[in-house]
Amino acid sequence: MHTTSPAAAPPVREPRHTPVAHLIRGGVIEGVHHGSVVVLDSDGEIGFRLGDVEAAFYPRSALKPVQAAAMVRAGLPLEGDLLSLAAASHSGEERHLAGARRILELAGLTEDDLRNVPDLPFGPAVRDTWVRAGRLPSRLAQNCSGKHAAMLYTCRLNGWSLDDYLDPAHPLQRAVAETVEELTGQRVARVTVDGCGAPLFAVSLHGLARAAACITTAASGTPEARVADAMREHAETASGAGRDVAALMRAVPGLLAKDGFEGVEVAALPDGRAVALKIADGADRARIPVAAAALARAGVDPALLTRFAGEPLLGGGVPVGRVRPVDALVPEPLACAQA
């Protein structure tokens, strides 16, 4: 699947989200999560949509595979787990920290050269251990340190300045923006700053799904294919032990998936089928069951997705409900499996 020259930027407006999931307790809808979902067929056409899939929004870390592809295009020579780490929102496990250090060493740099914000590890168990040991927030522990280390390495290889590598006008960020526009098939609507300090580009859900499809359908050996292969083969490096996005890639053969803060998820299969979603209130508890329903809509075997139906809602320690995608989203086979 390939794009032509980018179309116009998506409109900046209040997204016309619609209910995508219900919080059900004891058979009563206790809460409603609004959002938007798009499913692309293998030919790139929209096979299903719910809500507003054309409005501009920020994909947050779901855009990292595109950023990593841009860096590989610019000469980043990483492969395997280190390339997966370049596209990661990692949990801060020792393998993640060691990998980021290794990327910096390859560039002849240290943690002091990173410009991402210091933070505690993202993974709850890792963070708790870190705090108990009296360790302070660090740039290396922050969940985007692999991406930032790879950005610095890309700059060093190209002879670009290092101190201002996060400036949207920097050659690296201009190259990233060009790749975002090429793969999404649309102009960037807005540029702001992500939580880690890197530029963040506003596109549409439709464009994000299109970019993921471009990455998973790219010819073997291309920058896009190298990123997809690395993330699928090293799913826990791109996320962390026990993370749902890694489990989803392990469960569905050939699937590339990436989550992002504020309830964003994108996933694509090798034949170009792709899904992208945004939970309006940013609730993680709705993200994965909605993603599973969208993948079933895309034709993934529902039997592979039952474990992603959402964690049970407990009352007095006993399951009394769960977060469930709205009926309009759930294909019949998955609905039967979740009943």
Image (cartoon, rainbow, N blue to C red):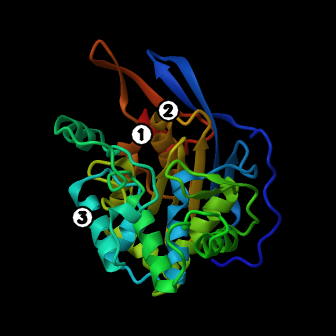
Which residue is located at x 38 percent, y 45 percent? 119
Q: Which mark is residue 309?
A: 1
* Badge 2 density bin: few <14, some 14–19, many ≥20, Cα 10 Å: many
Indicate the amino acid at tag 2.
Answer: Arg
Q: Earlier in the sequence, mark 2 or mark 3?
A: 3
x then y, percent, for residue 7: 81, 68
Whether residues under marks 2 and 3 lie with C-beta atoms below 8 angstroms apart, the answer is no
Residue under numbered circle 3: 98
**Left or right of residue 134, residue 193 in this image:** right
Whether residues under marks 3 and 1 lie with C-beta atoms below 8 angstroms apart, the answer is no
Indicate the amino acid at tag 1.
Answer: Ala
x then y, percent, for residue 211: 61, 67
In this view, the residue farthest toward the left is 133
Q: Earlier in the sequence, mark 1 or mark 2?
A: 1
Q: Nearer the viewer, residue 185 or 38?
A: 185
Element class at badge 3 = helix
Q: Report, in whole angstroms, how far the alpha carbon at label 1 lies from the one at label 2.
A: 7 Å
x then y, percent, for residue 106: 32, 79
Q: Nearer the viewer, residue 32 or 324?
A: 32
Element class at badge 2 = strand
Q: Eyeballing the image, is 248 above or below 176?
A: above
* Badge 3 density bin: few <14, some 14–19, many ≥20, Cα 10 Å: some
Q: Earlier in the sequence, mark 3 or mark 1?
A: 3
Q: Quadrant of the N terminus?
A: bottom right
* Badge 1 density bin: few <14, some 14–19, many ≥20, Cα 10 Å: many
Which residue is located at x 59 percent, y 32 percent? 281
Whether residues under marks 1 and 2 lie with C-beta atoms below 8 angstroms apart, the answer is yes
Residue under numbered circle 2: 324
Q: Quadrant of the C terminus?
A: top left
Q: Report, in whole angstroms, how far the alpha carbon at label 3 lies from the one at label 1.
A: 34 Å
